[in-house]
Image (cartoon, coloured by chain):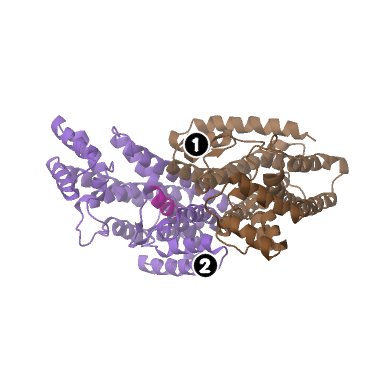
Chain colours: A purple, B brown
Amino acid sequence: MYTINEIQSLISIEIEKEIALINRNEPKNLYAPIAYSLTMGGKRVRPVMVLLACNLFSKNIEQAIPAAMAIEVFHNFTLLHDDIMDQAEMRRNSQSVYKKYNQNIAILSGDAMSILAYNYLLKYNFPEASEMMKLFSQTALEVCEGQQLDMDFENKMDVSITEYLNMIQLKTAVLLACSFKLGALAAKAPEESGNLLYTFGLNLGIAFQLQDDLLDVFADQSKFGKKIGGDIVANKKTFLLLKALELSDDQTKFQIQDWILRSEFDEKEKINEIKNIYKNLNVKTITEDCINKYYQTAIQICDQIDLPGETKTELIDLAQMIMNRDH
Amino acid sequence: MYTINEIQSLISIEIEKEIALINRNEPKNLYAPIAYSLTMGGKRVRPVMVLLACNLFSKNIEQAIPAAMAIEVFHNFTLLHDDIMDQAEMRRNSQSVYKKYNQNIAILSGDAMSILAYNYLLKYNFPEASEMMKLFSQTALEVCEGQQLDMDFENKMDVSITEYLNMIQLKTAVLLACSFKLGALAAKAPEESGNLLYTFGLNLGIAFQLQDDLLDVFADQSKFGKKIGGDIVANKKTFLLLKALELSDDQTKFQIQDWILRSEFDEKEKINEIKNIYKNLNVKTITEDCINKYYQTAIQICDQIDLPGETKTELIDLAQMIMNRDH
């Protein structure tokens, strides 16, 4: 088995190669923003998942590289269009694509990235290619559905926890699930193992997104890349806020809704007050328990995959790495 | 052979069925705009091309319906995103999607349409599916390139006729070419015939776009859907404008550039003056000759397709129908 670090190096080299190729294409105003968005990269967690899943069943992880590229390009496409929709000027300490170039260029480059993602999968032979593309296409549509639900929730006061979990499953978790399963498909792994990896990724993805909600409020600012409390300021309907609304008495509920409705306020004050409500309602522990529930389910599913225990160590390590991030 | 009218009825029924299905999907804010954009339909020229091309080689044109849907959904996706980029509030006498809903919904619904287009092609069995998807994906990317070049040309003064023809080939013609070839692939037609149909579509597509440029200036307003002279007002670098710049003496060139640079002007006056320049330089006839050259090339290629002449009558009729439009 390759280690996670080895896989990270390997995929980084491949992505750099692709960026160089893309940068050579014309017209520049279409392809340079695509290359730029791929250089912003981050940890490239999703392509690592593809390669690692492949490696569970095969020594030849090269065969999973096109699938890993498809996932990475698709993921960055969603970030690119999300940044337009959220009017987010920064992404990982750099200007977002629409800010660096302009909105029209960002729309069109994103469109091209979505097409490029399919092109990577078209490098496979059939019948695997068929299964991989069906899974990918279904997942891509679900990600759009999740993004729309997330936008819908902005104007909806009565979002239930169930609706919220469905939204993050679609917006975030299915892509992680798909990444793992694509790796298995690339390795021609047994169908059951591929499906278990999908469910593993789904649970890990939900745990990951809930953790994201939690870190927004309770992370250590020195280790956290973004500003603490961003979701609170923006009235984001996170698991924490929805849980607080569910658990609070009428007076506290009114207090929360009052903060949500205020158009002018002191950001620090709002963050502190909402954080206090969370503390009083024990929302932090409840969220941690919920994260843990999904995480443990993922680990149990991992146990069921028909592979020697030592082979699965890297998979568990990756899951832990994702969850212990303070970024 | 089915007649064009019969094929138009058939594909309209299929599109209506799909619209009904799409309208049942959730979230509504993602799928209703997709259904809406498909109802705006127009003549559905591209899916008709797919079915007609299939019908040249096979009685069973049903087998080309998913490919026809893929093309129609993809084409409407490009219109949807183009309308955001151009801030075009109207499309075929209805509100454009971004105007009726909002920009974020339009971006995301468009993204989903691009994915849906692939889903239709994924209904085919392999190996045809592989060839169809490769052709479609390549074409989709070229359409993005063409759209970017078109946007680039807005800020570029020295666009050559060659560059312009390359742009309209990518932005418009390759999708017509792809439509014809997809129909041939769906019918498992001989490879050479599919390639000839592709080149037929390419030449027809260029003729079609040049005709579009011509009609913008010289159409009969009573039969023309849009306002005459829209391209002139917007300083669009059409074939006519580029040809006029190429042929004009320094004084006329200065006159044209002066009109382009004026930020305030009387629209009617600008249209009349530019139209006069076109008349003096014989630009109308030159454009007509160029259209005719591409159209005749298309017809010659059609002659080369290894099919009985009477089978190809509907294909020629379709080409004529497209060119004789005054809308």
Point out which mark residue B33 bears: 1
Question: Quick one: which residue is furthest to the right in this view?
Answer: B309
Q: Residue at x 70, y 58 (%)?
A: B244
Which amino acid is tagged 2? Asn
> Can residue B106 be spotted in the picture?
yes
> Can residue A53 be spotted in the picture?
no
Which residue occupies the foreground of this view, A274 or B240?
B240
* Horizontal side, residue B120 vs residue B305: left or right: left
- Residue A306 in the image, given as x and y percentages of width and height: 40, 53
Mark 1 Cα within 10 Å, few/some/many (few <14, many 20+)? Answer: many
Which amino acid is tagged 1? Pro
The residue range painted magenta reads A77-85
- Residue B130 in the image, given as x and y percentages of width and height: 63, 52
Does A78 appear in magenta? Answer: yes
Q: Chain of mark 1?
A: B
Q: Quadrant of the C terminus of chain A?
A: bottom left
* Horizontal side, residue B63 vs residue B24: left or right: right
Which residue occupies the foreground of this view, A23 or A87?
A87
Q: Reply above or below: B166 against B128.
A: below
Q: Residue B9 is drawn in which quadrant?
A: top right
Point out which mark residue B227 bears: none
For disc 2, the marked residue is A23
- Residue B149 in the image, given as x and y percentages of width and height: 58, 58
- Residue A184 in the image, given as x and y percentages of width and height: 46, 55
Does A187 appear in magenta? Answer: no
* Horizontal side, residue A256 vs residue B5: left or right: left
Mark 2 Cα within 10 Å, few/some/many (few <14, many 20+)? Answer: some
Is mark 2 in CB contact (under 8 Å) with mark 1?
Answer: no
